[in-house]
Image (cartoon, grey):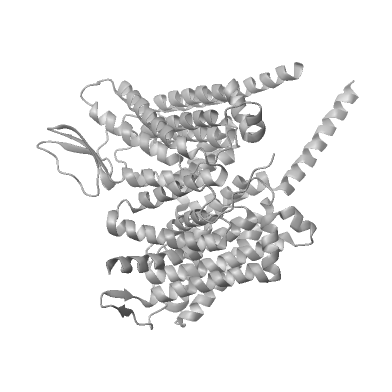
Amino acid sequence: MAMKKTLINRDKGRDLLTYAVVIAAFIVMQTLSTQGRLSSAVKGYLVPVCCYIVLAVSLNLLVGVCGELSLGHAGFMGIGAFSGVVLATLLKDTVDNVTLRLILAMVFGGTLAGLIGLLIGIPVLRLRGDYLAIVTLAFGEIMKNIIGNMYVGTDETGFRFAIATAKPKLVGKGKWILSGAMGVTGIKKLSTFAVGFGLILFTLFVVLNLINSKEGRAIKAVRDNRIAAESVGINVTTFRMKAFVVSAFLAGMAGALYGLNYSSLDSAKFNFNTSINILVFVVLGGMGNILGSVISATVLYILPEAMRGLADYRMIIYAVVLILVMLFTWSPKVKEYTSVAADKVKRIFRKEKEAAK
Amino acid sequence: MNILQYIINGISIGSIYAIIALGYTMVYGIAKMLNFAHGDIIMVGAYVSFCVTNYLGLPPLVSVAASMVVCTVLGIIIEGLAYKPLRGTPSLAVLITAIGVSYFLQNAAQLIWSSNPKSFTSIVSNIKPLHLFGSLTITGEVIVTVAVSVVIMLGLTWFTGRTRIGKSMRAVSEDRDAAQLMGINVNRTISITFAIGSALAAVAGVLMCSSIPVLMPTTGSMPGIRAFTAAVFGGIGSIPGAMLGGILLGIIETFAKAYLSTQFSDAIVFGVLIIILLVKPAGLLGKQVQEKV
């Protein structure tokens, strides 16, 4: 009983720490921003960092907590981005409040991504391990391909939607909002740091609550030993499905926020490399560690941007840093050294304690 | 007659996918890791061949040999520095390291050769295209590509089936711990696998750029992903499976481009992949392994 209590307290403590770090970071950045101490470059990072934090946390729910490797997260982000941008453009005259329009776009983007996640999840979640990884990869590429040939617009007949190889003709006066491989241009930027912060808080709330709930414990049991979990009556498919849909929903919201932060957007952005980058954030931050995802998404997004001065060398340095961090955090030899060192430190402290007695 | 031409073109692209997929499948079967840097080794191989023919003026066969040597050495170095220290860790950790290696190779290539596309001179310029039944054309590149891929597959089947090292490779892929207990040097076997896989990647790179003569630092990444799906398609870990998967993928891609639509060829290829995996989750020729408690 006592052990159970400390375990729960430790989890709660870590969750509170996660919220505290995020809120503190927001307050610091917001004050610096209002005092005008941030350069325009740093201000430009704020919203994308929020998006990538949400993407990393939502992917961590899938990869770290469920143990399902997904290589198509950018696909959900793309669905959210384009549907969000299209809705925001359609609502330009009906909804005056900018923040409300942004939130509506995000909710719409998230819902659509979640629905598509549900549709894909039904067949795909029957697969496991590397096969699930390859199918999610395939899904991401299909999404990129379809969005790159999708036309959405309005004309005198009303709303027009087409998936075609060539641009269809509009009837009378009208305009394509999303125009195939050209993507969307002339987007009115709506995203703000405050809304991004709100989305991070919402994501943390949803994901942390899910992890700590009865369902979250079931999901972790499925990750650690699927057969054992099944044999004690856990419905494996339902839980995997829930995590998959929640993750897709959050990625879609982040995508809408991301899309409405730029003046133009095309489908090539949401490719395999973006999915991989998000996965790198998750793995370097620590699997299943939400605070780790938040920190690593921030640091790893800013790192290559901050090295722009190094021009051509920056991505090489990024690659080397990535390899070295993986070697130092995972290599069994390094782990041995650190555990020996930790033991020695502990022993010194124990001796001091005993001496104090 | 058109259908025959498309089948021939498809087999030609498919053979290149098959050679790349063979490298993927061997490394996966033995090291149990997705080596995402494999596609970039293809690119390095093509660049080496390009430099040897264009700057040193040596004959094509020498350039192929040179690129195979460079890629083999590169493969062994990468394996030793980046993958070997992570032996026995979760496959995701090695996957991320492989992605790091992939970024590194792409950006190093960009520094050395710049990102401007280079036009690759085909290594088979002295074989004249065959004209059959009037409208059917088989280029020298197609003949060489298909012949090379068949030779490679037969060679690998013989190698893994008959030689000492090949047998130890199969043993390691089946059960690493048991193989080690039987006195097989697991680390050396894995290094040899990487060496062979990288040499195959060099050949694939040269053949690919002979058919599609555009060479850029990102040339290898998309064929790499395609070939990976081909390996999964045929049943990852199986050598005939990789060959079959590669050629089928090439044919599906060519037919999709010819009869359905060029723009949607990606969606069609990956859609077929998803359907195949749902029907046969272990791939076409893969073995379904029953999970034990």
Relative side of A205 to A269, left or right: right
Quadrant (top left, top right, bottom left, bottom right) of the N terminus of chain A: top right
Relative side of A18 to B204, left or right: right
In the figure, B139 relative to B92: above or below?
A: below
Does residue A139 appear in the picture of this structure? yes
Comparing B202 with A244, the one in front is A244
Horizontal and vertical percent for residue B200? 54, 68
Q: Identify the residue shown where x is 63% and y is 30%.
A: A230
Q: Identify the residue shown where x is 42% and y is 77%.
A: B123
Relative side of A78 to B166, left or right: left
Does residue A294 appear in the picture of this structure? no
Q: Identify the residue shown where x is 48% and y is 44%.
A: B278
In the figure, B287 relative to A257: above or below?
A: below
Horizontal and vertical percent for residue B253? 37, 58
In the figure, A114 relative to B127: above or below?
A: above
Horizontal and vertical percent for residue B100? 55, 52
In the figure, A328 relative to B192: above or below?
A: above
Quadrant (top left, top right, bottom left, bottom right) of the C terminus of chain A: top right
Relative side of B101 to A72, left or right: right
Comparing A142 with B251, the one in front is B251
Question: Where, by quadrant of the figure, is residue B219 drawn?
Answer: bottom left
Q: How many marks?
A: 0
Horizontal and vertical percent for residue A327? 65, 49
